[in-house]
Image (tube, helix red, strand yellow):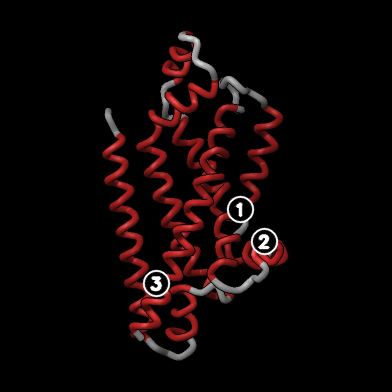
Amino acid sequence: MSGLLFDGTLETFYMVLLASVITALFGVPLGVLLLVTSRGYFWESPNFYRILGTIVNALRSIPFIILMVAIIPFTKMLVGTSIGTTAAIVPLTVSTIPFTGRLIETSLRTVPYGLIEAATSMGATPWQIIRRVLLPEAMPEIIQNFTITVIVIIGSSAMAGTIGGGGLGDLAIRYGYMRFRADMMIATVLILILMVQLVQWIGDMLSRHYDHR
């Protein structure tokens, strides 16, 4: 049992870590793009914002368990298989990138517009405003919201076990539920709780570090 739990924990950690990194690489730029193309910002484009926002909202509306099944052909095309921890990363990121994009947009909207106007009046370019004003000023909120994303990924990674995604969710289904092993079920739940607590603690610590208000 201990060997199975160790392997399952490593698989879950692998899925969560890689999915979180990919989500950050695509979700943060998506959130910035949503903000700067919205009304009142320097790349305002109502039609583009409306279309992109509709796509983001549509992807966010699909339940994860349905999304996993729906994009199996896409997953096979990318990684060559639809089963296993690597395959599970594809629906995890497809699900959380639009979710993260909206959270990042919300975080960036906490930056007072007066700071943007001040930077513009001093001759700052849009890219400089994004890098030196928007992202640094909203960093505590970005970290807190991304912490929520990572916790969602942990929960979704456990759900991925229902279709052979591996990790702790797979152990809970195959050994805890199908073989009536209450001890295995409890152990997987406790490990997932500890992972969530650890992620939240790290997120809170980093958020306080970057909060200079």
Q: Measuring 58% from the left and 75% from the top, which residue is drawn there?
A: 163
- Image quarter of the C terminus: top left
Where 75 falls versus 212 (above or below)? below
Label 1: how many Cα within 10 Å (few below 14, some 14–19, many 20+): few
> Looking at the picture, which amino acid does disc 2 mark?
Leu
Q: Measuring 63% from the left and 23% from the top, which residue is drawn there?
A: 44
For this rendering, which residue is in front, 37 or 87?
87
Label 2: how many Cα within 10 Å (few below 14, some 14–19, many 20+): few
Label 3: how many Cα within 10 Å (few below 14, some 14–19, many 20+): many
Where is residue 204 shown, x and y percent of the image? 29, 46
Which quadrant of the figure has residue 52? top right
For residue 61, the mark is 1
Q: Earlier in the sequence, mark 1 or mark 3?
A: 3
Instruction: Give the alpha-carbon distance from disc 2 to disc 1, as whole Å.
Output: 23 Å
The residue identified by callout 2 is: 78
For residue 9, the mark is 3
Instruction: Give the alpha-carbon distance from disc 2 to disc 3, as whole Å.
Output: 24 Å
Local SS, label 1: helix
**Dot in front, 2 or 1:** 2
**Dot in front, 2 or 3:** 2
Where is residue 103 shown, x and y percent of the image? 48, 42
Where 21 falls versus 12 (above or below)? above
